[in-house]
Amino acid sequence: MPDFATYPSLKGKTVFVTGGASGIGAEIVQAFAAQGARTGFVDLDAAASARLSETTAGEIAFETCDLRDIGALRAAFDRLTDRIGPAQVLVNNAARDDRHDWADVTPDYWDERMATNLRHMFFAIQAVAPGMIAAGGGAIVNVGSNSWWEAGGGFPAYATAKSAVHGLTRTMARDLGPHRIRVNTVVPGWIMTERQKELWATPEALERHRQRQCLPDLIAPVYVARMVVFLASDDAAMCSANNYMVEAGSI
C-alpha cells in the first residue's frame, strides 16, 4: 500500500458522506476518519453501517435512511448535525449501477433510477449549504462515473444520471462559489469493489477493461477516496467546478 498523505486542514472538520457503509463510500469514510475528521455517513444498510462504525478508528457517526426519500435524508442530516456538528464537507457518493436493458425500462423504473443516482445529490447540497455559508466556506465532492464518457452500454438510466452529476457540479460551483464553497466531481473508472467482483468482474471482462486503461493495474476503492480527501482539504482551495479522473487512463 502506498504511503498516503495527511492533510492537517481536515483534522477536526465535520464531514458528511452519503452511501458510506460499503464499497467506495466505506473507503471514503475510513479515509476521512484517518485524517482526524468528525465523520458522519448515511446509508440504507443498517447492519453494514454498524460494522463499519465499529471497526473504524476515529469519530464516526451514522444514520440509516433511504436517500430516495428526501424527507428522510433531511432528517438524517439533522440528526448527524446534532451529533457531530454542521457539515463542512459533503461527499455525495451514494449510487447503484444496476444493469438494465433499454427496451425494458418503464417510466417508474426511470424515475426510481434518477432518485437513486441523482436527485438526492441536489437535496443533500441544499441541506448543508446554509451551514457552510454561515461558516464562511466548505467543500462538496460529487461522485460521478466514467461510464458515459466511455459510451458504456447496459445501464442507460444510470449513465444518464451520472452524466447529469457533472452539470450539477458546474452550476452549484457557480452559485455557491461566492460563499467560498467549492464543488467538484470525482470520476471513477471501473473500481474493484466487492459488489463489482461478485456481479460483473469476470476474467474476460477484466481483460477487456485492462486493454482500455493506460495503466495495467485494476483500481482499488482507496484511490477514489484519496482523491476525495484531497479535494476536501485546503490543498485544493482553488479547485472548483471541475472533474478529477480516477480511471487509470481508460477514456
Image (tube, rainbow, N blue to C red):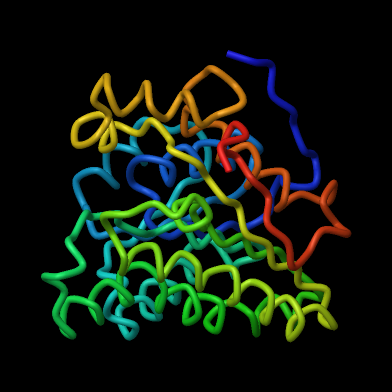
Quadrant position of residue 26:
top left
Q: How many marks?
A: 0
The residue that appears at 33% across and 76% down in the rendered structure is 114
The residue that appears at 82% across and 76% down in the rendered structure is 136
The residue that appears at 46% across and 24% down in the rendered structure is 210
The N terminus lies in quadrant: top right
The C terminus lies in quadrant: top right
Q: Nearer the viewer, residue 189 or 154?
A: 154
Quadrant position of residue 115:
bottom left
The residue that appears at 24% across and 43% down in the rendered structure is 48
Judge left or right: residue 168 versus residue 162: right
Whole-percent x and y of residue 72?
30, 79
Above or below, 80 against 186 in this view is: below
Above or below, 57 against 152 in this view is: above
Quadrant position of residue 203:
top left
Whole-percent x and y of residue 228?
63, 47
Judge left or right: residue 87 versus residue 6: left
